Amino acid sequence: MSTSNADIRTAAKNAGVYLYQIAAKIGVSEPTMTRKMRYEMTASKKANVLSVIEKLRLEKEDTPQGGMRRRK
């Protein structure tokens, strides 16, 4: 049996992004996000989650090690 939404899990892991961060960005609770991950998402929902992962990855790259954002 393969894991549901394996591509999302892999993308999040490779980007160093946690499910709770994705959930917050999407506007759902962490338990809701976990439940959504149990079953394969539709292509449009999956595309939305993958774009959120990419945004979080870019934000993470722009943030210095201490977690504080740089002033521009």
Image (cartoon, rainbow, N blue to C red):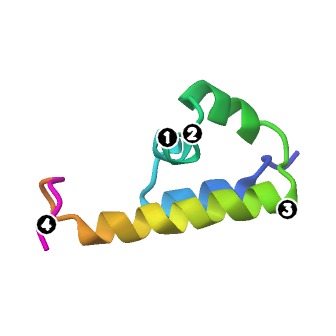
Q: Residues within 10 Å of mark 1 (few under 14, many from 20)?
A: few
Classify residue 66 by image quadrant.
Answer: bottom left
Point out which mark residue 43 bears. 3
Point out which mark residue 24 bears. 1
| Amino acid on which disc 1 is placed | Ala
| Amino acid on which disc 4 is placed | Arg
Tell me the CA gap for discs 1 and 4. 22 Å
Mark found first going from the N terminus, 3 or 4 = 3
Residue at figure coordinates x 61%, y 60% from the top left? 10
| Amino acid on which disc 3 is placed | Ala
Residue at figure coordinates x 64%, y 63% from the top left? 50
Q: Is residue 7 left or right of residue 64?
A: right
Q: Is residue 54 magenta?
A: no
Point out which mark residue 70 bears. 4
Tell me the CA gap for discs 2 and 1. 5 Å
Mark found first going from the N terminus, 3 or 1 = 1
Question: Looking at the picture, how far across and down is residue 60, in whole percent?
Answer: 32, 63
Q: What span is in magenta?
A: 67-72
Q: Secondary structure at mark 4?
A: loop
Q: Is residue 63 left or right of residue 42?
A: left
| Amino acid on which disc 2 is placed | Gly
Residue at figure coordinates x 11%, y 67% from the top left? 71
> Could you tell me what secondary structure mostly forms the magenta stretch?
loop
- Mark 2 — residue? 27
Mark found first going from the N terminus, 3 or 2 = 2
Question: Looking at the picture, how far across and down is residue 70, in whole percent?
Answer: 13, 66
Tell me the CA gap for discs 3 and 4. 35 Å
